Image: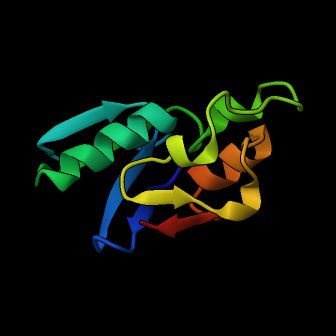
Amino acid sequence: MSRRRLHDHRRQRSIAVVGSHESPASRERHQAVVIGAGPAGLAAAATLQGEGVEAVVLERDSVGSSWRKHYDRLHLHTVRRLSDLPGLRIDRREGRWVSRDGVVRYSNGTRGTTA
């Protein structure tokens, strides 16, 4: 899996997400390493970078992949406005209670708006 960068347009920064299929020769040094590119991992990396700490996120599969494995009708148990990652709002088109597919889109950066 190749590197992917999630971009926060408001703060003009990006988070490096590295898949497990990278070759050992591509190892680099980082100030912080976050394991998992789910919502918690992405939030941790964004918060670290907001504090000036360079972070890389390691993910076995793809960004938000754990959400793809949940049942179709799953929705967040918190309203959209309380479920944002730091610096990236969930788009209003996702509705008040964001669906599983909405979380996957949001995690991949296709349905977020800058805060």
Q: Position of residue 1 (x, y in %)?
A: 54, 48
Q: Position of residue 90 (x, y in %)?
A: 58, 56
Name the residue at 64% across, 65% down.
110
Q: Position of residue 16 (x, y in %)?
A: 35, 54
Q: Position of residue 25 (x, y in %)?
A: 28, 45
Q: Is residue 29 left or right of residue 81?
A: left
Name the residue at 75% across, 63% down.
93
Please say if 20 is above or below 17.
above
Can residue 115 be spotted in the picture? Answer: yes
- Tally the numbered discs: 0
Q: Quadrant of the C terminus?
A: bottom left
The residue nearer to you, when weighing 47 against 97, is: 97
Please say if 107 is above or below 33.
below
Q: Is residue 64 left or right of residue 114?
A: right
Can residue 20 be spotted in the picture? Answer: no
The residue nearer to you, when weighing 69 against 88, is: 88
Name the residue at 31% across, 49% down.
46
Please say if 94 is above or below 19.
below
The residue nearer to you, when weighing 88 against 65, is: 88
